[in-house]
Image (cartoon, grey):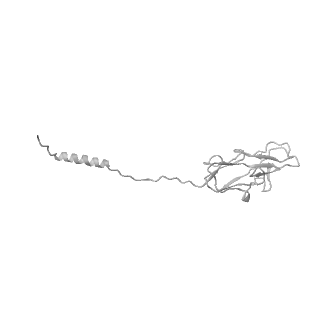
Amino acid sequence: MSQPRAPSLKGWILMIGVMCLRDAMASTTTDTFTVSAVITSGCALGTSSATNTTDLGTLSFGTQAALSDNVDATSSAGAGSIVVTCTPGTAVTISLDYGVNGGSATKRYLSNGSQLLGYQLYQDAAHSTVWGNGSLAYSISAFPQTTQTYPVYGRLFSSSTVPAAGTYTDTVTVTLAY
């Protein structure tokens, strides 16, 4: 039986290289990175939280031949209701101005040229809480998790005289403060 031969210099270098390569491949190192997102408090009008809408629709009192009695109307989404999306927990105030026709907390006006018809907007179906600004704004102490729709209750006041024929309008601005 012959004795095993000692490796040559080239053999030793090859074995050392293989062992170093094996050891290099067995080592690992780790590090971390951070992932983050910042959510700011905010609100939007309309059905999308991404963009504010410029028109909430029209609260219509319909077609009337005369105004011998008050005419009541309730808004709906896309027809005068106020649709709001806010960051949950945000304190919000919804204010309505008194229109472009010289209205007040007592009475707003629809106009057809110089002809005026009195009306008012309310926060409740009983028509007991005027919806305006300041103390007449609607306040939410902590906005809920989902989009909310707030109906507007309108009352077109009766008139002792028959108004002139035509289309009567007003424009009311909704303001969200948060």
Q: Is residue 86 left or right of residue 118?
A: left
- Which quarter of the image is occupied by the C terminus? bottom right
Give the image location of residue 18, x and y in percent.
Answer: 25, 46
- Count all numbered tags in the image, as a single digit: 0
Residue extending furthest toward the front: 1
- The residue shown at (52%, 52%) is 37
**19 with respect to 140 (left or right):** left
Between 72 and 162, the one nearer to me in the picture = 72
Q: Residue at x 73, y 59 (%)?
A: 135
Q: Specify the farthest residue to the bottom.
A: 135
* Residue 65 x, y percent position in the rendering: 85, 42
Q: Where's residue 5, x and y in %?
A: 14, 44
Q: Quadrant of residue 2?
A: top left
Q: Please identify the residue farthest to the top as the structure is shown.
A: 1
Residue at the right extreme of this rendering: 160
Residue at coordinates 71% horizontally, 47% vertically from top-left? 81
Q: Is residue 71 left or right of residue 133?
A: right
